[in-house]
C-alpha cells in the first residue's frame, strides 16, 4: 500500500498587535451607530459609549441602561463586473452602562459587544493576486468587546478610558495522517488551539463649555492580527526516495484596523442636535495585506527536489485617510412617548492605492447615509423607560478602476463598484 | 409587581438580543480566473471517431462481446455500472494504459489491460465475485451478467482482446474497437453552439500524412468527430496538414493550417460559417523573411480591430511572427515579435532556446481596455530550484506575453507574463512537455488545451 504520512509537529499562530473594532467602524456600532452613519461621538447611546466615546459614560441621564439588538448588512459589490460574492454581515450587539456620582464627580462604567452570529473571527487570507474586496471579505466578521470607565467633573470635562479585548488564536500542533492509496484516500487530523487575550486602548475626552455645546476627541489603538503557521511535515512515500521533513510557513495578516483619532463637536438647539466629526485613520502603518507561503526544506534530506519558489508581495502602500462625518437627531414628544429621528452622512475615503502591479486589493471611496429612529416608552405605571431603535444604512461605493501597467498582471485591470445595504433593530431599558 | 415586570422586560430584551452561532452564509470570494494562471492539473481529453478513442497505441484496439449484448448510451462514467465505463458515448469495459484513465474505484490491470473493480476482500466484489490480485473477478451464468466487452466463459466474466490483425473473436461474437490508433496534435478550440469545436491534425496508423479533423464536445472533455471523416485532407491542399487555427468571421469560417512542415500557411474558407466543410483554400503565407529561415508554421489567427492578426512560428523555434490583414492577403513580418530571449527570467524561466506554436487571444478588461495575449510553447528551464537537479532540465512549457491594443498591431511591444511559464506539468517529479496551446472561455472557466507527447490535455483556470 502506498502511504503518505504527514506529521505536523509544530504549528503556532502568532498574531501580533492589538485588538480593536472593525465591523463597528464599517457600519457603526449598533442600531443608532448605523442610523448616524458612524458619527457617534456625541449622541446619547450609553450602551455603545465604550466603543464610540468612553467619556460619554459619565455624561448620561444617571440611569443604568442595558440593551441589545441585531445587525444585518448585505455587501453587494461588483469586482471586475462580476458579483464579489461576499458573505452577509450578521451580528448581535449588546451593551450596559452603569453611572454613579460622588459629590461633584460623575462616573460611569460601560460594556459594549458586537458578536457575529457566524464566527468569532474570520481568518480569510488569500493570495495577493486574488481580486478581493479587501475591506469587506474578512474585516466585518469579528468579535468586538469593549470595557470602559469614565469620570466627569462639574458637568464640564469628562475623560474616558477603555480597552478593546480580543482573543488571539494559537495552535499548539496540527497532526495529519493521510493515506494516499490510489482509489482510497483517507485523512485524519488532530488540532489543539489556545485563545489568549489581546488588549487595545480606547481613550477619549469630552468638554461641555455650555449645556448646548460638546467637544470631543477619541483615540483608538490599532489591530493587527497576523498569522504565522510553521508546519514541519514528515513525508514518506513508500517505493520512492521521498522520506523526510518538509517545512511550510504560512504567514499573513487576517485582521487589521488602524489606530484612529476622531475629533468633533455638537450643538443643541431646542430638540435638535447636530454633530460634525473628522476621523483620522493611520492606514499607512499597515505593512502586509496578503498571505504568503514560505517553503523550508533540505532537498538532500527529503530525497526529492521540490521546485518551489516563494512569492513576495510588494508593500501594500495604504494611505492615511481623513473622513468627515455629520449627523443629527430631532426629538418629538407625543403624550408619554418620545420619537427621535436620526440621520447621518459620512464620506469614507479608501486607503487602498491604485492597483497597478501584481496585487488586486479592491476598494473605493464610500458615501454612507444612515437613517433611523427611536421610539421611547415613558409609561408611568412601568417606571422603567425603555426604547426601541431601528436604523438603516446605505453605502455607495464609488466606481473605481485601477489600470495595470503590465498587460498580463494577474487579473488585469481591477474595478469595483457597488452598494452596501444594512439594517438594524434593537431595544434598551433604563432603571 | 413592578420588580416582576422589570425582570420580565429584561429577560425579553436579552432574548431579543440573543446569543449564539447560526449557520454561515457560505464562503465568499471567487478564485482568480483570468486565463493566465494558476491552472489546475492538466488532464487528458477523449477524442472519438466512430465510437473509438483516438490513441497512439499498437495494442489490439478492441474487445470481443456477444452479439446482441448492446452497450447503453452515456455521457459520463457515473451513468454506467462498474466495471463498465463511458467510452465515446457507450458503457463498456474500458481498455486502458494507466489507472488514471479509469473511474473511481477501478484500476487498470489484467490482460488485456482494462479498468477493473479494485478490491482487498471477496466481500467487496458482490455475491458473484471474488477478489483476485486486487481486482474483482465475477462469476456468471449468462452473458448479461458480464459487462459489455466481457464474455461469460467457463462461468467467469473474461475480456478477450481483438483487432483487425488479430486476435479474432469466436462465433456469435463481434469485435468492437475502442481504439483508433492515431496521433493527434495541434488543437484549436473554438465555441460551437452550447459546446466546443476542436480542430486538430490526425495521423492515423500506417498513414504518412496528417489530415485535419473536427471534433465537437458538450463538456470540454469528451470530443466526437463531426463529421466522422476528415474535413481537410492531403488531396485538397499540400501533402501534410498540421496545426490548424480556426477563426469565425463575418465573412465565414476560416481555417489556417501549416502545410508540409512549414513550407506554407494555407487558409481554407467555409462561407456558411459552420466550419464543417471548406469550399476553397488558398495560400496565406510562405517563408520569405530572412529570420524565418525557410519555414513558417503553426499559425494562429485572431480578429482584432477589424482585421485578422496572424501569428506564426518562424524557422525552427527562432521566433514568432505577427502580420495583419483585412482581406486575407498577408505579408511576412520583417522581424519576429517574440524571440526566445524575450522570455528569459533568471528566477523563473531560464535558458529559453525556442518559441513555438503561438496562440492569439484578445482579452477585454471591465475597464474596456483590450490586451492581445500570445500563448506559446517555449523550450527552457522552469524554476531551476536546484541547479543540477531533476528539474534543471530544458523542456517545453507554455509561456504567455501580452500587449495593450492601443496602437497598430504591427508595432505592439509585448511584455512577458511576470511568472512564466504559465503552465508546466510535473509528473513523477519530472517536468513534462507541452506546446501548441489553445485557450477558450467555456462554462465559466478558461480552458487551456495543449499538445503533449501523451496526447491533448486540458487545464482549467480557475482550478476546480
Image (spheres, rainbow, N blue to C red):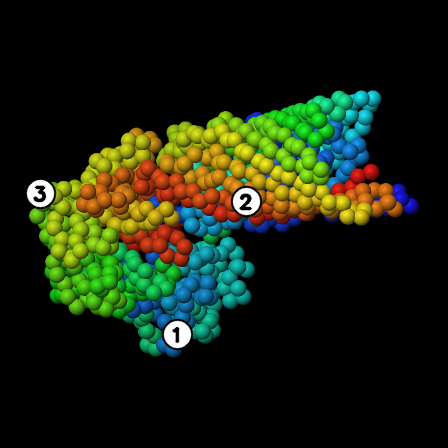
- Is residue B219 placed above or below A225 in the rendered structure? below
Mark 3 or 2: the one toward you:
2
Instruction: Tell me how far mark 3 sits from mark 2, CA to CA.
Output: 62 Å
The chain identifier of the residue carrying mark 1 reads: B
Q: Please report the residue visible at 47 percent of the width from the left and 40 percent of the height from the top.
A: A364
Q: Secondary structure at mark 3?
A: helix
Q: Which mark is residue B290?
A: 3
In the image shown, does A375 or B250 lie closer to the viewer?
A375
Asked whether, in this view, residue A15 is left or right of residue B72, the answer is right
> Whole-percent x and y of residue B47?
31, 61
- The image quadrant of residue B48 is bottom left
Q: Alpha-carbon neighbours of circle 2 within 10 Å: few (<14), some, or many (≥20)?
A: many
Asked whether, in this view, residue B14 is left or right of residue B313, the answer is right
Instruction: Tell me how far mark 2 sits from mark 1, CA to CA.
Output: 63 Å
Q: Is residue B183 visible?
A: no
In the image shown, does B130 or B443 lie closer to the viewer?
B443
Q: Secondary structure at mark 2?
A: strand
Quadrant in the picture for the C terminus of chain A? top right
Q: Earlier in the sequence, mark 3 or mark 1?
A: 1
Q: Please report the residue visible at 68 percent of the width from the left and 45 percent of the height from the top.
A: A341
- Judging by the rendered image, the residue that carries numbered circle 1 is B70
> Whole-percent x and y of residue B251?
21, 63
- Judging by the rendered image, the residue that carries numbered circle 2 is A395
Amino acid at each position: 500500500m502506498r502511504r503518505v504520512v504527514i506529521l505536523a509537529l509544530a504549528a503556532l499562530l502568532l498574531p501580533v498587535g492589538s485588538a480593536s473594532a472593525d465591523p463597528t467602524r464599517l457600519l457603526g456600532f449598533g442600531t443608532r451607530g448605523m442610523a448616524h452613519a458612524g458619527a457617534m461621538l456625541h449622541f446619547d447611546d450609553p450602551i455603545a459609549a465604550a466603543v464610540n466615546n468612553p467619556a460619554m459614560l459619565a455624561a448620561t441621564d444617571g440611569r443604568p441602561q442595558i440593551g441589545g439588538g441585531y445587525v444585518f448588512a448585505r455587501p453587494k459589490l461588483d469586482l471586475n463586473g462580476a458579483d464579489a460574492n461576499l458573505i452577509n454581515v450578521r451580528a448581535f450587539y449588546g451593551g450596559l452602562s452603569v453611572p454613579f456620582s460622588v459629590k461633584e464627580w460623575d462616573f460611569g462604567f460601560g460594556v459594549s459587544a458586537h458578536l457575529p452570529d457566524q464566527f468569532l473571527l474570520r481568518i480569510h487570507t488569500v493570495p495577493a493576486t486574488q481580486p478581493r474586496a479587501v475591506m469587506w471579505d474578512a474585516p466585518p466578521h469579528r468579535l468586538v468587546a469593549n470595557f470602559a470607565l469614565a469620570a466627569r467633573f462639574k458637568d464640564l470635562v469628562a475623560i474616558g478610558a477603555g480597552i478593546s479585548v480580543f482573543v488571539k488564536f494559537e495552535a499548539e500542533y496540527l497532526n495529519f495522517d493521510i493515506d494516499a492509496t490510489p482509489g482510497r484516500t483517507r485523512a485524519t487530523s488532530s488540532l489543539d488551539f489556545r485563545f489568549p487575550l489581546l488588549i487595545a486602548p480606547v481613550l477619549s475626552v469630552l468638554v461641555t463649555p455650555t449645556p448646548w455645546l460638546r467637544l470631543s476627541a477619541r483615540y483608538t489603538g490599532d489591530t493587527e492580527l497576523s498569522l504565522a503557521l510553521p508546519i514541519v511535515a514528515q513525508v514518506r512515500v513508500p517505493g520512492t526516495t521521498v522520506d523526510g521533513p518538509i517545512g511550510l510557513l504560512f504567514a499573513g495578516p487576517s485582521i487589521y484596523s488602524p489606530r484612529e483619532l476622531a475629533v468633533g463637536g455638537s450643538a443643541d438647539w431646542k430638540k435638535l442636535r447636530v454633530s460634525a466629526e473628522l476621523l483620522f485613520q493611520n492606514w499607512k502603518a499597515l505593512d502586509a495585506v496578503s498571505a504568503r507561503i514560505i517553503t523550508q526544506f533540505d532537498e538532500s534530506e527529503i530525497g526529492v527536489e521540490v521546485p518551489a519558489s516563494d512569492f513576495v508581495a510588494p508593500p501594500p502602500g495604504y494611505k492615511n485617510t481623513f473622513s468627515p462625518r455629520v449627523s443629527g437627531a430631532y426629538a418629538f414628544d407625543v403624550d408619554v412617548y418620545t420619537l427621535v429621528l436620526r440621520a447621518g452622512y459620512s464620506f469614507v475615503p479608501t486607503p487602498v492605492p491604485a492597483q497597478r502591479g501584481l496585487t488586486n486589493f479592491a476598494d473605493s471611496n464610500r458615501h454612507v447615509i444612515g437613517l433611523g429612529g427611536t421610539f421611547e416608552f415613558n409609561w408611568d405605571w412601568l417606571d422603567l423607560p425603555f426604547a426601541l431603535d431601528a436604523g438603516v444604512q446605505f453605502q455607495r461605493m464609488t466606481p473605481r478602476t485601477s489600470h495595470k501597467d503590465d498587460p498580463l498582471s494577474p487579473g488585469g485591470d481591477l474595478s469595483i463598484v457597488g452598494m452596501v445595504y444594512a439594517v438594524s433593530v434593537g431595544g434598551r431599558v433604563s432603571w | 409587581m413592578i420588580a416582576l415586570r422589570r425582570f420580565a422586560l429584561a429577560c425579553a430584551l436579552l432574548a431579543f438580543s440573543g446569543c449564539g452561532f447560526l449557520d454561515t452564509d457560505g464562503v465568499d470570494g471567487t478564485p482568480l480566473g483570468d486565463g493566465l494562471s494558476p491552472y489546475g492539473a492538466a488532464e487528458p481529453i477523449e477524442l472519438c471517431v466512430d465510437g473509438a478513442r483516438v490513441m497512439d497505441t499498437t495494442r489490439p484496439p478492441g474487445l470481443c462481446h456477444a452479439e446482441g449484448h448492446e452497450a447503453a448510451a452515456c455521457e459520463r462514467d457515473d451513468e454506467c455500472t462498474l466495471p463498465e465505463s463511458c467510452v465515446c458515448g457507450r458503457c463498456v469495459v474500458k481498455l486502458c494504459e494507466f489507472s488514471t484513465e479509469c473511474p473511481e474505484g477501478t484500476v487498470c490491470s489484467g490482460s488485456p489491460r482494462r479498468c477493473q473493480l479494485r478490491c482487498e476482500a471477496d466481500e467487496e466484489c458482490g455475491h458473484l465475485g471474488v477478489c483476485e490480485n486486487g481486482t474483482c473477478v465475477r462469476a456468471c451464468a449468462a452473458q448479461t451478467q458480464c459487462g459489455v466487452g466481457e464474455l461469460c466463459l467457463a462461468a467467469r466474466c473474461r475480456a478477450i482482446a481483438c483487432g483487425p490483425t488479430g486476435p479474432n473473436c469466436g462465433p456469435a461474437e463481434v469485435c468492437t474497437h475502442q481504439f483508433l490508433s492515431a496521433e493527434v496534435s495541434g488543437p484549436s478550440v473554438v465555441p460551437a453552439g452550447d459546446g466546443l469545436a476542436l480542430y486538430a491534425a490526425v495521423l492515423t496508423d500506417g498513414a504518412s500524412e496528417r489530415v485535419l479533423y473536427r471534433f465537437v464536445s458538450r463538456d470540454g472533455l469528451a470530443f466526437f468527430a463531426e463529421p466522422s471523416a476528415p474535413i481537410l485532407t492531403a488531396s485538397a491542399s499540400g501533402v501534410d496538414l498540421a496545426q490548424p487555427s480556426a477563426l469565425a468571421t463575418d465573412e465565414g469560417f476560416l481555417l489556417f493550417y501549416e502545410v508540409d512542415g512549414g513550407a506554407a500557411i494555407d487558409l481554407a474558407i467555409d462561407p456558411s460559417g459552420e466550419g464543417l466543410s471548406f469550399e476553397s483554400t488558398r495560400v496565406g503565407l510562405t517563408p520569405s523573411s530572412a529570420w524565418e529561415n525557410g519555414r513558417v508554421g503553426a499559425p494562429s489567427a485572431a480578429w482584432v480591430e477589424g482585421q485578422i492578426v496572424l501569428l506564426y512560428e518562424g524557422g525552427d523555434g527562432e521566433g514568432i511572427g505577427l502580420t495583419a490583414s483585412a482581406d486575407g492577403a498577408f505579408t511576412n513580418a520583417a522581424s519576429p515579435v517574440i524571440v526566445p530571449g524575450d522570455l528569459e527570467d533568471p528566477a523563473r524561466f531560464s535558458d529559453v532556446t525556442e518559441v513555438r506554436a503561438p496562440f492569439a487571444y484578445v482579452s477585454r478588461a471591465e475597464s474596456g481596455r483590450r490586451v492581445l495575449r500570445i500563448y506559446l510553447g517555449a523550450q527552457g528551464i522552469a524554476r531551476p530550484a536546484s541547479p543540477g537537479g531533476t528539474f534543471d532540465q530544458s523542456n517545453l512549457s507554455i509561456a504567455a506575453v501580452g500587449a495593450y491594443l492601443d496602437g497598430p498591431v504591427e508595432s505592439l511591444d509585448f511584455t512577458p507574463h511576470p511568472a512564466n511559464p504559465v503552465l508546466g506539468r510535473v509528473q513523477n517529479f519530472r517536468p513534462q512537455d507541452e506546446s501548441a496551446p489553445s485557450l477558450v472561455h467555456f462554462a465559466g472557466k478558461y480552458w487551456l488545451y495543449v499538445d503533449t507527447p501523451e496526447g491533448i490535455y486540458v487545464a482549467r483556470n480557475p482550478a476546480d
